[in-house]
Image: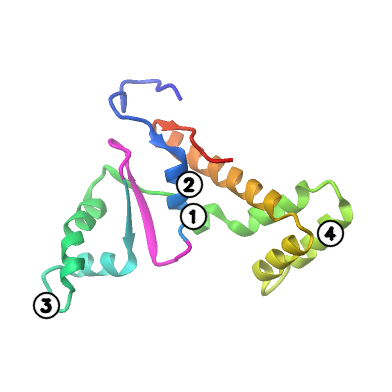
Amino acid sequence: RQLESDEGADMKPVSLQSVVNEMDVPSDEMTAYINKKTGELFTVSEEETRIIEAGNDDDEFVPEWQKEVLPKVREVLQSDDFVALPDKFEIHEYSIMERFCLSLPDEALQNELLHAIRGSGAFRRFKAAIYRKEIQDDWYRFRNESLKRIATDFLESEAIPWLDDVVR
C-alpha cells in the first residue's frame, strides 16, 4: 500500500501472511507484538510478562534459556515502538463463524450451522458439521480472509506498510 506520509517510508513492508499467522496463535497465554518502525514480530508469553513486571528476570529460578529472551521481552513491553496485534477478543472467532454461516447460499445448511454454533460446545459442533458437510475448505478460506481483513485494518490504523502475500 502507499504511505501518505514519510513515516515508515524507509521500512520494508511487513508480510501480511506473517501478521495473520501471529494473530492466529491458539493460546490465550501468548500476545504477539509488532514493531511499528521495523515491522519486527515478537510473541511474548504471559509468564515472561509476569517475570518482567515483577522484576524477577535475574531470579535463580528462571531457566537460562528464558533469561536469554527476557531482555527482548522487556524491550517489547516497555517500548512505544511495539504494539500488540489484535487478540482473540478483537478477532472474535464466533462472529466469523456466524458470518460464514450467513454467507452460505443454501438456507437449510445455513440454518443447520447456525443451530450448531448456539450454546456450549459451539466450536466443536461447528467443526464437526463443516467436515460432515465437506465445506471445511470454504470455511478455512473464509476464516483466512476474515483474519486478513482484521490484520490489514490494524496495520493501516497503525500506519504500518504491508505486502499482501497471503496464501489463498
Q: Are marks 2 and 1 in contact (CB under 8 Å)?
A: yes
CA distance separating discs 4 and 1? 27 Å
Disc 4 vs disc 2: which is toward the camera? 2
The answer to whether 149 is drawn above or below residue 161 in the figure is below
Front in this rendered view, residue 60 or 92 = 60
Q: Kindly identify which residue carries mark 4.
A: 111
CA distance separating discs 3 and 4? 57 Å
The answer to whether 119 is drawn above or below residue 164 in the figure is below
First of labels 1, 3 by sequence position:
1
Q: Kindly identify which residue carries mark 3.
A: 60
Q: Kindly identify which residue carries mark 2.
A: 20
Which stretch did the figure color magenta?
Answer: 26-40
Q: Kindly identify which residue carries mark 1.
A: 24
**Residue type at tag 4:** Asn
Q: Residue 58, which numbered label?
A: none
How busy is the neighbourhood of tag 4: few (under 14 within 10 Å), some, or many (20 plus)? Answer: few
Q: Position of residue 150 (x, y in %)?
A: 53, 44
Helix, strand or loop at mark 4? helix
